Amino acid sequence: MKYYPLFLDITRYKCLVLGAGGVARRKIATLLKAHAHEIIVIDPYCTQEVFNKAFWEEYDCEPAVTYLQRDFVSNDLEDIRLAFACTASSEVNGNFVKICEEKNIFCNVIEEPERGHFIVPAHLDYENLVIALSSSGVSPAFTKALKDDLNNWIAKSYVPFLRLIKILRPLILKNVEEHKRPQIFRALVEKSFREEIMAIIELKKFHELHRKLAQVLPESVVSKIDDNEIFKLKKK
């Protein structure tokens, strides 16, 4: 299966999750993190109290969802844009997908992804940097191993560097003439310069950072950098 990669803004989407077990709760947690407009959870067997308790223990927060302890009916899909079949029953999931298809609603089937319309790939989420990974079903184990490798590599240097760019960007936009900005943004991420900046951040030699940045940034920007923000670059 060859998938089309896509990052989706779901802040205006109403989503439905069928099932309330551990797999469903993981899916709900990712939807909450992406600020889904509304999440409806339906499960005839799990009480809301049990669901809330399990979610709190796993994610240390209250699940902001509409919870319905009953069987699913087709009218539940009214105004739904994304649906997720997370039950332990292949038959229930299959019937759910068919109804979604009839209503032109994209449905993801957790345990049997080939039966659905899309997959949610393994991904790494570092504030402003999100990386999605998929082996197109060839080897989920390899995808997980690659995710672990990338996490060890990226979290150490690239995430703090991106935090720095987030600090600098508004200062550059405000204090540098428009025609000069592209050259500055390119210089900041040029390989050798970027690696030197990442090394300075990794070693927490923040006193050297202003000097290094002054090689590509005008004084009108460097002088306005908030040192309190710089000290937070290596936060977890």
Image (cartoon, helix red, strand yellow):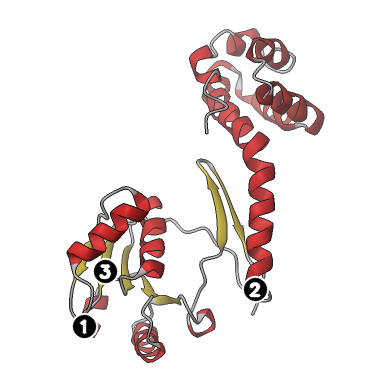
Q: Amino acid at mark 1?
A: Asp
Which callout, 1 or 2, points at the residue further toward the start of the chain?
A: 1
Residue 218 placement, left or right of 12? right
| Residue for point 37% across, 86% down | 89
Above or below: residue 180 compared with residue 161: above
Q: Which residue is mark 1?
A: 71
Which is nearer the eye, 36 or 143? 143
Which callout, 3 or 1, points at the residue further toward the start of the chain?
A: 3
Pointer 1: residues within 10 angstroms few (<14), some, or many (20+)?
A: few
Give the SS element for disc 2: loop
| Residue for point 28% across, 62% down | 39
Q: Position of residue 99 (x, y in %)?
A: 33, 87
Q: Amino acid at mark 3?
A: Val
Q: Nearer the viewer, mark 1 or mark 2?
A: 1
Number of marks in the rendered image:
3
Which is nearer the eye, 36 or 48? 48
The quadrant of the picture occupied by the N terminus is bottom right
Give the SS element for disc 3: strand
Q: Amino acid at mark 2?
A: Ser
Image quarter of residue 79? bottom left
Determine which of the numbered discs, if any, sits on residue 136 in the image: 2
Image quarter of residue 234? top right
Pointer 2: residues within 10 angstroms few (<14), some, or many (20+)?
A: few
Q: Position of residue 38 (x, y in %)?
A: 27, 60
Q: Which residue is mark 3?
A: 41
Label 2, label 3: how far apart the Cα atoms are:
28 Å
Label 1, label 2: how far apart the Cα atoms are:
32 Å
Give the SS element for disc 1: loop
Determine which of the numbered discs, if any, sits on residue 205 in the image: none
Which callout, 2 or 3, points at the residue further toward the start of the chain?
A: 3
Asked if residue 226 can be seen in this view, the reply is no
